[in-house]
Amino acid sequence: MKKKILIIGAGFGGLTAAKNLADTEFEITLIDKTNHHLFQPLLYQVATAALSPSDIAVPIRSLLSDNKNIKVILDEVISIDKNNHIVNFKDSQLEFDYLIVAVGARHSYFGKNEWEQLAPGLKTLTDALVIREKIIEALELAEKETNHELMKKYLTFVIVGGGPTGVELAGAIAEIAKETMIKDYKNFRPEDTKVFLIEAMDRILSSFDKKLSEQAKEDLMNMGVEVKLNAKVENISQDGVHTNQEFIPSKTIIWAAGNQASPLLKSLNVETDRAGRVIVKKDCSIPGNPEIFLIGDAAHFEEENGNVLPGVAQVAIQQGKFVAEVIKNQIPPERRPSFRYKDKGTMATIGKAKAVAEIKGLKLSGVIAWLAWSIVHIFFLIGFRNRFRVMIEWIWYYITKRHGTRLIVGK
Amino acid sequence: MKKKILIIGAGFGGLTAAKNLADTEFEITLIDKTNHHLFQPLLYQVATAALSPSDIAVPIRSLLSDNKNIKVILDEVISIDKNNHIVNFKDSQLEFDYLIVAVGARHSYFGKNEWEQLAPGLKTLTDALVIREKIIEALELAEKETNHELMKKYLTFVIVGGGPTGVELAGAIAEIAKETMIKDYKNFRPEDTKVFLIEAMDRILSSFDKKLSEQAKEDLMNMGVEVKLNAKVENISQDGVHTNQEFIPSKTIIWAAGNQASPLLKSLNVETDRAGRVIVKKDCSIPGNPEIFLIGDAAHFEEENGNVLPGVAQVAIQQGKFVAEVIKNQIPPERRPSFRYKDKGTMATIGKAKAVAEIKGLKLSGVIAWLAWSIVHIFFLIGFRNRFRVMIEWIWYYITKRHGTRLIVGK
């Protein structure tokens, strides 16, 4: 009788694992609570009306339809019973011989969950559409607002968190508010709009080289973004953001500050780090259960040098491949190799023809970094259709400065 | 002091009127409760995952950004005070010298509004996304369903109403359930899926020539659609549709049967027809108020021969142009010409390489009608970007038989 492998999550890690286990003797079930694989690195472009959801999301099912040994299920796992090798759904359950948990992370409000309503984060397509509508609605409300104070609130955008997502959002929103969409409004002008990027540390993009952080900050400031460093958020209200430095009146606040692993991991009851990520062994399995693996943003993996791997696509992809190999060859725990991460570099885009990149010690910025960023992202997108569409959209936007998907659909 | 023109609704009628009044001495405000102009003839393709919302919707604002005398406002008109020349919003109001009401129609459940939850209709982008998710979710639920009876319910799709929208939906859903998406599911086969088209009259597409109705019915049946004529819906429940002929168990029911004009029109208190459309005079104005015009689906316009104009894009567009001319030249009521509709023909597509068209007495079907349909719809789409994208999507779909936008985004 065939051995059963369950994979929870069809992000970069889960999908890579599934692909690498395709057409083997195992019976594989890939479970996700959405029906699509999402290319998260470009999600901020959906949130800023540059791309359509369907440009960066592909039905998981159609990616695996040719692989006879893989079943795809749209459902949400409620808990994992590691001792009896069962995962539980709302009204059913599945058994497994091997389990790969690749559930990713949600954003964390550091205990202040009431802030989520006021300052949404960006992880799913739904998040992106919520933010897109928030931004466009703010401009629409400003257009018909007669009270000047209130209008200023609508025209002030605050992004909390100076990591890659925060920087990319701030840059894209500055383009919208200072250059592109603004043309179409007749009641206010570019200088009436404000974009703030709030970072608690002393520099943005702290995972990058200091020089690149500086460069990114300069670029953002030239685009009209006010970058606030060493600024800790103390409270968020209907009226704006309170930091340890000031109060910023704003109706549009976006959260890009920090992640929290899925609560599902608690049911494994194993040791986790402060972000709720499971601390895994060198083979990505959990202590005591060599048949259960955790990969990607849900895992806390420490390299020999004590450095903990970041929550980026490359880590998830490489771990997915690694774990698939271990299972395929059914390597007994004691003989398993240690996972080794090959850093292929990190990049963040800031705006048109502006980006920073660090590739094997090489530090790039400006147009070169931006071109590298564009090529890499087109290349890693799944499916010819999406590559083609995104490329066309970018060229279209570059030439016309018109956003392709400025829609408020609502519910 | 400049005269004020208010236009309510930025559909085909309202937008055409605005465009034709651009750069005149009038001060124009175009009001819509959405931020986009929607190309409704292709809405069914968004509902069936062939196109993205942004392919057929354009921000109203960006269409008119160059016209200095036109202001665009995103808001909902609550009532019209025809005597004091005021339109009221939730918490503001606007005065007018001329008013053009082009608010379109919603679908009508003939008093059974409780059916709307069970059988959504198709008029807005939100409607289309709701239907798209309903269809995809039904297939997903069937894939993991073990109870065979329930699975059959998930795999049965019922479309109520055999007009163009109903026929187009039935054809597109048959392609999904019998041919394209079905490939990706491993738990059931094409013959397990059923698509019903229910029509109360003795033929579908009753506005077309009898021969074409026959042809369309045959085409649908060849695609696997069960067409039920003289079938009146008596009840709709969680479990399916009861007609005067039978009970059809189904979890996915779509309503395409009949329209109801906007309730806003009541505030005009003038005579309306059974569908709630305002009965307008020969110059499209309302009795007693020559400065208030009603056009498009919201108007009941009777031609000399007693024939009432249908609720199609061409009527709205031509009326929009006509009314704009009357206002531009400030023609006094007694000297105004009568609006005359030039019928440019009607078409409906059934499926790949299948359509019916009636153009100036010429009756077309099959590939020729389908090509004509495709060209006309690409041509009338607004904006080069959308024309290009839709064309690419169609070619892509024609070749690969893969739907571009099979996403469940949810909320």
Image (cartoon, coloured by chain):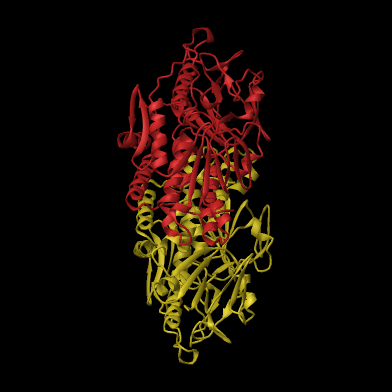
Chain colours: A yellow, B red
**Total of numbered circles in the picture?**
0
Q: Residue furthest left?
A: B368
Q: Nearer the viewer, residue A8 or B145?
A: B145
Q: Residue furthest front?
A: B245
Left or right: A56 as drawn, with respect to A141? left
Q: Nearer the viewer, residue A344 or B254?
A: B254
Q: Nearer the viewer, residue A337 or A380?
A: A337
Residue A385 x, y percent position in the rendering = 36, 55
Residue at the (62%, 58%) spot, across then down = A119
Residue B126 showing in the rendered view: yes
Residue B58 showing in the rendered view: no
Indicate whether A142 appears above or below A52: above
Q: Residue furthest bottom?
A: A334
Q: Is the N terminus of chain B in the top left, top right, bottom left or bottom right quadrant?
A: top right
Indicate whether B224 appears above or below A39: above
Residue A343 x, y percent position in the rendering = 41, 77
Residue A94 x, y percent position in the rendering = 57, 71
Residue A146 x, y percent position in the rendering = 63, 38
Left or right: B337 as drawn, with respect to B278? left
